[in-house]
Image (spheres, coloured by chain):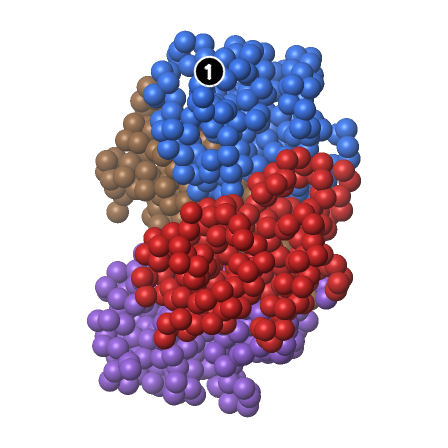
Chain colours: A blue, B brown, C red, D purple
């Protein structure tokens, strides 16, 4: 069940503190959103430190990404809206910049996705029941043309089966979503662990 | 002396917070158990965040790994039960996913165990009295067939002398046990340090 | 608007705690300053732990870097003063030692600056509006001759367009400045993330 | 001025919490001591977690390393006593196990010391006034024969000029000392930073 605006704000403030404590909210990076009971989207205001959000640092957009309040939403609100339009089950979207997501997407050849195989921690991702699988996290080239990027993301996501829980923007960071803020947060935490492992393995060379 | 259920729950909740603060409980990873004064086992419920456990997030199993309450135990409860059956002195078992344990087990050739030599910190492990030793942490291939995995683990552990304090599942994580939650936690912390050192050494090449 | 001395002290004490919590204030490293409403500069006293500053650990200098109180300012106060003279919009300067800034400046050939391209997080830096840019963070050779170093820094900074928000001293650390303590802190946090990514990429080799 | 036993205990408990918060006190590793006003030495009891010390976790030894209470001192008390005998100005000794100190001493060829050059952070070490220097941190082979190790340490330290503020045991960790617990702690923090930088540089190869 979708929350009211005031409980969505409380959840967004709290998850910002937890992500910052894990080193996943440096400077003003990241933006977070929650689908509301009236069908609108609560989303962080542009340019705030996500580890120190207050009540006023959340604004609202509609499902087309249009601002519903004077406070300007994150510049990437269109991406959040696109994910909510595409996936009815998505109730929360979290976007973070992290060393692992930025580095891994730049270490891979352009055009490559991140492919994760053989990790038990993959089972944290919704719908994954075994380590013996091959999970593709799609990687998109970063762009400042937000409508074009949102379209590219939606077009490609719509073709992917099984439904992913996350996507990566090259040199930028990760977007993760889920049926609640907590589920989206778990996806973020699991991918941080897994991408950190992948980078270690790229350095030394996997044997098994 | 084995604790009552209520003090076991308090210990499990507390160790989850400490492990999470050290970055050893991302997402819903890990599971923890304690042997009780009535011979049953208190074990974390499946799918909870171990850094934010509450009173209701612990359930009970018997020594054969069968659930004794409605709340479902961790899917890996059979492994916990097997360790308690094998080692009468084991009073607590902690399982965590970490970058070091996942990466190191994937950097080694399949079929290799982790071998730790020459580290003073090895003396944290029960029964180890010198750095000038060779400690084998057995590595098992990961599996979703929990009864089969538990059997493979028990069969091999039964052959190992001296008795190990920990085992590794490839691409999955570490299991550590001890005469108390605190002792098992010390094994987890010591192995994190030691496996992190081993990975650094694999990167650069040891000279001494 | 520039703050009074007492509110500048409160800001300096607080930012020291935050930077220390992020591992950016080991031992007595770093020094911080704020431009005051009377045109003087509040700056940390020499030799204190920046994570545990008290009210007495801040002193004052004038815009030429001369001490205005008995408490000795940081040995690097001349550098702070030079930055304030050069940039009227700079209201706060933060200097930290970190593994990333020290290592990256020593990994690069002498005479090289740090060049950051293609990172979304660059948009945290004042005036940067796209990842598709090339930001130069000037690197200076370290020196104990503070007047000479301050002169070298001022001479070169005066030639740089666009105006940088930070500089690096080789094997020493980063200086960052901004229109407030919070903005300077955001530059520090963003550069930590970006320089950590650059080091990872130097290790493995970038493909995109 | 040397403290009383009760204030030494308070300082030891507090520094354990700070070091643990920085990841420098995993499991039961490390031991800490303070020279008392009566010429005896307060030292941590063997086998306790240094991040969670209580009033009872400190005992006393004399300058020859002999236990003065029933509570057993750390097995390495002889090394602490040797440092106090050798350096009248040493008022506190801190020993920690860390990834950086363990790894770096094993990455270097046997017989090599750690040599640190060109780092501004070296100025944290007592007596160092410029980065343009060459600081030798002596490395000793680890041993379980504590009297022999203490003798080897004392014999070599007595020949070193200038007086070092720290030594390393290979595959074991760092000992640091100073005119107060805070000064010894600063040496620990500075060396952690510097050794972490050295390891990064060993990985990638220094250019300047």
From the top left corner, tell me how far across and down residue B129 is, in percent. 46, 65
Specify whether residue A15 is in view.
Answer: yes
Q: Nearer the viewer, residue C131 or B9?
A: C131
Q: Residue at x 45, y 50 (%)?
A: C181
> Residue B58 falls in which quadrant of the image?
top left
Which class describes the residues within 10 Å of circle 1: few (<14), some (14-19), or many (20+)? Answer: some
Q: Nearer the viewer, residue A181 or D5?
A: A181
> Residue A113 falls in which quadrant of the image?
top right
Left or right: A136, with C53 as reference point? right
From the top left corner, tell me how far across and down residue C13 is, in percent. 37, 56
**Chain letter for mark 1:** A
Q: Which residue is mark 1?
A: A68
From the top left corner, tell me how far across and down residue C151 is, in percent. 63, 68
* Above or below, D137 relative to D57: below
Specify whether residue B149 is in view.
Answer: no
Q: Residue at x 27, y 43 (%)?
A: B2
From the top left corner, tell me how far across and down residue D143 is, in percent. 52, 74
Q: Which residue is outermost to the bottom? A: D159
* Above or below, A93 relative to D198: above
């Amino acid at each position: 069940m979708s929350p009211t605006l005031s409980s969505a704000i409380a959840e967004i403030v709290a998850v910002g503190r937890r992500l910052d404590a894990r080193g996943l909210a440096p400077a003003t990076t990241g933006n977070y959103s929650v689908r509301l009971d009236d069908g609108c989207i609560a989303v962080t205001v542009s340019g705030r430190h996500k580890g120190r959000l207050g009540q006023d640092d959340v604004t609202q957009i509609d499902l087309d990404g249009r601002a519903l309040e004077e406070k300007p939403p994150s510049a990437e609100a269109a991406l959040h809206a696109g994910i909510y339009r595409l996936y009815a089950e998505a109730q929360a979207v979290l976007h973070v910049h992290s060393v692992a997501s930025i580095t891994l997407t730049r270490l891979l050849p352009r055009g490559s996705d991140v492919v994760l195989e053989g990790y038990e921690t993959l089972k944290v991702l919704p719908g994954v029941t075994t380590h013996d699988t091959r999970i593709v996290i799609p990687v998109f080239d970063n762009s400042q043309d937000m409508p074009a990027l949102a379209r590219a993301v939606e077009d490609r996501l719509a073709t992917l089966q099984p439904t992913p829980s996350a996507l990566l923007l090259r040199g930028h960071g990760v977007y993760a979503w889920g049926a609640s803020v907590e589920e989206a947060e778990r996806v973020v935490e699991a991918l941080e662990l897994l991408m950190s492992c992948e980078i270690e393995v790229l350095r030394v060379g996997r044997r098994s």
